[in-house]
Image (cartoon, helix red, strand yellow):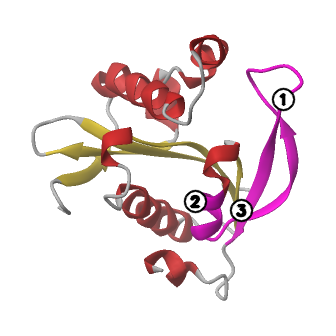
Amino acid sequence: MAAGYFIRPAKLEDIGALTDLCMRSKQSNGYDDDFMAQCAEELRVRESWVLEDDFWLAETEGGKVVGCIRLSEDLSAGTGELETCFVDPHWQGARIGRTLFGRLHETARRHGLKRIGLDADPHAEAFYARMGFTTVGRSPSGSIPGRSLPRMELDLSPEDGMERQDT
């Protein structure tokens, strides 16, 4: 346990709290209600994410979900995709994101992944860069026609600098 929260696997009964967290965290980047309505379906947490992916959450001692991270994997290709990563706006700066990334890295290495990709929210690009990701291009938004997102990748080779997560 770290600073009033702990990390655990997501459960089906967490879906509502996780969806609420994703929406609140995304909107804290300054997006208006119209933008959020367009993103709502893409941000809605699904049962399959909990059942099929590596999905963890950060929970307070009082039972509030304050962060989450989700990794889907293609083990045959040795790659993964960071699909979901959000921290409650009131808990940002409490190292929840870094702690969740520790779990992501641990799982990726245990499963022998060589690379993790992600389509980043532009407001989170600098955070992902601090976590070791490099911007490699642009990807179309899954919610907003004509909008593109930074495409980022993390090389998990032994000399990838994963130890930078404490910087």
Residue 120 showing in the rendered view: no
Could you tell me the amino acid type at mark 1?
Arg
Q: Farthest residue to the left: give it.
A: 62
In the picture of the structure, the residue carrying the numbered disc 2 is 127
Q: Which residue is drawn at 53% across and 81% down?
A: 164
Find numbered disc 2 in the image and state the secondary structure of the residue it sits on: helix
Which residue in the structure is indicated by mark 1? Answer: 147
Q: Which amino acid does label 3 sit on?
A: Gly
Residue beneath label 3, please?
Answer: 78
* Mark 3: secondary structure: loop
Relative to 29, 12 lies left or right: left
Give 90 or 46, whichever is nearer the viewer.
90
Neighbourhood count class around disc 3 (C-alpha, 10 Å): few under 14, some 14–19, many 20 upward: some
At x 63% / y 22%, what residue is drawn?
A: 42
Q: Residue at x 64, y 60 (%)?
A: 126
Task: State how far apart marks 1 and 3 are (Cα).
Answer: 29 Å
Q: Which residue is drawn at 64% across and 19% down?
A: 39
Q: Which of marks 2 and 3 is in front?
A: 2
Residue extent of the magenta highlight? 126-155
Which class describes the residues within 10 Å of circle 1: few (<14), some (14-19), or many (20+)? few
Residue 52 position within the rendered picture, expressed as x and y whole percent measured from the top left: 51, 36
Mark 1 or 3, nearer chain start: 3
Other-residue count near label 2 (Cα within 10 Å), few / some / many at <14 / 14–19 / ≥20 = some
Label located before the other in sequence (1 or 2):
2
